[in-house]
Image (cartoon, rainbow, N blue to C red):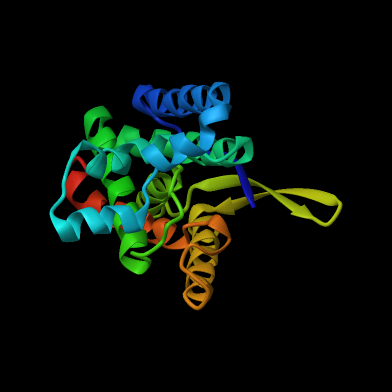
């Protein structure tokens, strides 16, 4: 299922959301231009759980122990990875920024990304596969959206074999199906490695839950 737009208007210009989207695109272009050093960049600025856990266990902290927790949120493994994440952020992020306010939304986004990363590290602390991508933080946006706007309509593209179907789904159904897919995939991955197939399913689950919890503390009172 691919979200194309929602029918939920926002009152303010979501410029933080636009900046985050623009930042992700620019950083990916830098990755593309420096493709000769792609693997080195991913391992340096992505989160490698076993490396982080080793530093924590040995109390060997430096800048590169914690910097990847943030830089990894703005890196992607390919064009489809980037486009898919930015589409979700474009569709759902503006309303969350509208409800939280600009600075609170930025704080919310970063904290949701951290919650996603720590969940994945907790599930698979010995993984040597770098974690990159905005999907954990975006999952936090989805967790807040389903609580704030459960009945908003989401125009959804559903490919069925060679046919394409456009339908409007309520947000609770679209995001509920999305979360169940992440949860089932995460549970199945436990037997073969929690980052099976290169997808950090538990980061999505942890980000979604973190976003729902953060909403309680960061939502502006009307």
The relative height of residue 216 versus residue 43 in the rendered view (above or below) is below
Where is residue 170 drawn, in percent x and y? 54, 54
Image check: 109 left or right of 83?
Answer: left
Quadrant for residue 196, please give it: bottom right
Give the residue at x 30% y 65%: 122
Image check: 203 left or right of 164?
Answer: left
Where is residue 73 drawn, in percent x and y? 39, 40
Give the residue at x 33% y 58%: 50
Q: Is residue 147 visible?
A: no
Viewer-side residue, 107 vs 98: 107
Point out the residue furthest to the left here: 59
The relative height of residue 54 versus residue 137 in the rendered view (above or below) is below
Viewer-side residue, 65 vs 110: 65
Where is residue 124 drawn, in percent x and y? 38, 66
Give the residue at x 20% y 36%: 63
Where is residue 45 drawn, in percent x and y? 37, 37
The relative height of residue 203 versus residue 14 in the rendered view (above or below) is below
Quadrant for residue 197, please give it: bottom right
């Amino acid at each position: 299922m691919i979200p194309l737009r929602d029918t939920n208007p926002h009152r303010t210009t979501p410029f933080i959301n636009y900046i985050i989207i623009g930042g992700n695109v620019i950083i990916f272009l830098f990755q593309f231009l420096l493709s000769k050093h792609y693997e080195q960049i991913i391992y340096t600025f992505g989160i490698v759980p076993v490396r982080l856990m080793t530093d924590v266990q040995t109390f060997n902290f430096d800048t590169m122990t914690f910097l990847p927790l943030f830089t990894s949120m703005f890196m992607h493994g390919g064009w489809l990875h980037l486009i898919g994440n930015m589409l979700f952020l474009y569709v759902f992020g503006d309303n969350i920024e509208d409800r939280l306010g600009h600075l609170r939304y930025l704080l919310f986004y970063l904290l949701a990304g951290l919650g996603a990363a720590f969940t994945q590290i907790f599930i698979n602390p010995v993984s040597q596969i770098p974690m990159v991508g905005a999907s954990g933080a975006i999952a936090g946006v989805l967790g807040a959206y389903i609580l704030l706007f459960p009945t908003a309509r989401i125009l959804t593209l559903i490919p069925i074999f060679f046919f394409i179907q456009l339908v409007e789904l309520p947000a609770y159904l679209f995001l509920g199906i999305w979360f169940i897919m992440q949860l089932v995939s995460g549970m199945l991955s436990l037997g073969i490695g929690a980052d099976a197939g290169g997808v950090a399913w538990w980061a999505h689950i942890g980000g979604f839950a973190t976003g729902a919890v953060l909403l309680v503390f960061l939502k502006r009172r009307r």
